[in-house]
Image (spheres, rainbow, N blue to C red):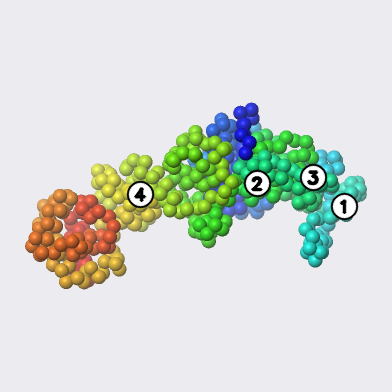
Amino acid sequence: MKEISVSNKNVRVRFAPSPTGWLHLGSARTALINYLFAKNQNGTFVLRVEDTDLERGDLAFLQQQINDLKWLGLSWDEGPDPDTQKDQGSYKPYLQSQRLPLYQKCVHQLIKMDKAYYCFLTDQEIDQMKKKALEEKTPFRVNSPYRNGDLQQAQERIKKGESAVVRFKVPEVKKNYVIEDIVRGKVTFPSDMVGDFVLLRSSGLPVYNFSCAVDDYFMKISHVFRSEEHLANTLRQMMIFEAFNWPLPVYGHLSLILGEDRKKLSKRHGAVSCNEYKKQGYLPGALLNFLALMGWNPKTEEEIFSLSELINSFSLKGLNPAPGVFDKKKLNWINSQHLKQVTAESLWEMLTPYFKQKGLIFPNSSSWKEKAVLALRSSFSSLEEAVEVFSVLSKNHFEVHETAKDILKWPSTIEVLNEWKIFLKSYASQEVSPEAFTKACKEIQKKLGVKGKFLFMPIRAAVLGCPQGLELKLIISLIKRDVLLKRICSLQKK
Ligand code: GLU
């Protein structure tokens, strides 16, 4: 592929969501790639809202998408303000629904240049054409009798109240449209892939391809990074650029994100919106790190990047045309690596709302909190998962798992737990140190002649409620002696 030189361009990129739902991981990745390129090149990152298709209710999704982008830390230089939604930047407005006069003006220009026309075909007539194409096994293209109609007559019909769309006149002479795509290399589109397509609906609202091309030009967008699903639209947009004699932006069509079954990532695969990952307690920096590595290769062994490291190491050459496969285990690993970089104090702060929601109660001492975080932080990969792990330390939370029930039936268990209770009762302090615990175990072993799993599993079951998991002596030192005693008593009652 050709080396891509950008130094002579004033880099302006845009993320152009249609706020019809939550911010999908794929869209977040598109936003990220645009952001990284802009920041790496000292360029401008624009947020443009493609909302001409929306019902009013969908505007709630706009605020949600804005919140998600904000949470991710992908701040834009131009576009609606994240808090007030008021436009910021010299190319405003940034909501397409507020740019309708511009689309009207451009469409009239095309009509005047004889590159677009009013078309009165009804939906039924178009359906008939589709049916015929299907019967004849030929690809469907609209063949409008209005293509070479008289403009004045058309305008009169509209004045009288008839409704018409405006269609683009696809050049009659077949030719190839070619782009040098940053991700995919040379892509050739034969012009007869499309028939005369709609620019403006009869309601006066533009269709996506038209408003997108117009805005990319008027907002001086230099590079368009978007999902490869839009490749088929690129031909139409190139035709519009050509009709106006506008210079074309550089395109880069990012590969899809697939589920592990190699089908397009969707709800079937689990959580797909940023918001769900936020709720589950993934760190924004970790999610960005993970998304960046899906479709972009840093060309180093390093896999953990902060956002500023991503900006510095970003290069277009690393963009990969192969689809990215969503690997949840990798996301968890990346998140746990990011969690490790957070101080114990901040981690506790992040965890607090999760603990509150679950009703967990912990000692209010900062040294205890720090000790607890340090002992447990490698046992979870998200904040939500941490709740489960920390719950064993909460004085109001003790459950005996199914897996521990067998252990409690072993004949030696009763004796071990009795000795463990005697030890705890006689222990002078509320904090059983790891050394004291080891010593006590040795004594119980000597007295009862019980060792190995017959010694530790019952204690583990009585402390954690489950036979496996965290390092027992660390956990014991984090639970008050009285709470430990209460746990055995509750077991013995059963
Ligand atoms: N509104 C389009 C989308 O959400 C944007 C496509 C583009 O970037 O051109 O997919």
User: For disc 2, does the CB lie below 8 Å from ligand 1?
Assistant: yes
Mark 1–mark 4 Cα distance, whole angstroms, equals 66 Å
Q: Which residue is mark 3?
A: 175
Residue type at mark 1 is Tyr
Q: Nearer the viewer, mark 1 or mark 2?
A: 1
User: Pointer 1 and pointer 2: residues touching (CB < 8 Å)?
Assistant: no
Q: Which residue is mark 1?
A: 146
Q: Is residue 377 visible?
A: yes
Q: Nearer the viewer, mark 3 or mark 4?
A: 3
Q: Residue at x 33, y 52 (%)?
A: 379
* Residue 66 pos. (x, y %): 55, 45
Residue type at mark 3 is Lys
Q: Which residue is mark 4?
A: 352
Q: Indicate which disc, 2 or 4, sits on the residue closer to the N terminus.
A: 2
Residue type at mark 2 is Glu
Mark 2–mark 3 Cα distance, whole angstroms, equals 30 Å
In the picture, the quarter occupied by the C terminus is bottom left
Q: Residue furthest front?
A: 1
Mark 2–mark 4 Cα distance, whole angstroms, equals 38 Å
Q: Residue at x 50, y 53 (%)?
A: 326
Mark 3–mark 1 Cα distance, whole angstroms, equals 23 Å
